[in-house]
Amino acid sequence: MSYSLLSLAGDTKRSAMKGLRDAAVRETQRENNNEQLKQAEKQQTMSSVGSGAAIGASFGPWGALAGAGAGYVIGELF
């Protein structure tokens, strides 16, 4: 009888450790996905700034500055 209790305790411990490992893996995946989303948002904003500056540049240096500002605002909103 004591053997089956020891075996049960070992099985429970292994199951608990597996659950903790699985939770840690999921947390790491979630953190990586969140970081990728942040990088994609930053890249989109910079692309909008560049596009706005390029369009504004056709109106001169102040237009480029205004276009970059408008691109930044639009990039942050959308």
Image (tube, rainbow, N blue to C red):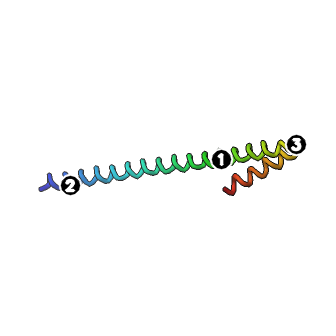
Q: Residue 55 carries which label?
A: none
Q: Residue at x 80, y 48 (%)?
A: 67
In the rendered structure, the answer to whether residue 21 lies left or right of residue 7 reads right
* Cα separation between marks 1 and 2: 54 Å
Identified by mark 3, the residue type is Gly
Q: Which residue is drawn at 19% across and 51% down?
A: 7
Q: Which mark is residue 60?
A: 3
Q: What crowding class fits label 3: few (fewer than 14 Cα within 10 Å), some (14-19), or many (20 or more)?
A: few
- Nearest to the observer: residue 55 or residue 53: 55
Q: Which of disc 3 and disc 2 is earlier in sequence?
A: 2
Q: Which of disc 2 and disc 1 is earlier in sequence?
A: 2
In the rendered structure, the answer to whether residue 14 lies left or right of residue 36 reads left
Residue bearing the label numbered 1: 44
Residue 4 image point, x, y percent: 15, 54
Residue bearing the label numbered 2: 8
Q: Which residue is drawn at 24% across and 52% down?
A: 11
Task: Give the foreground label among 2 and 3.
Answer: 3
* Cα separation between marks 2 and 3: 78 Å
Residue 38 image point, x, y percent: 60, 49
**Does dot 3 land on a helix, a strand or a loop?**
loop
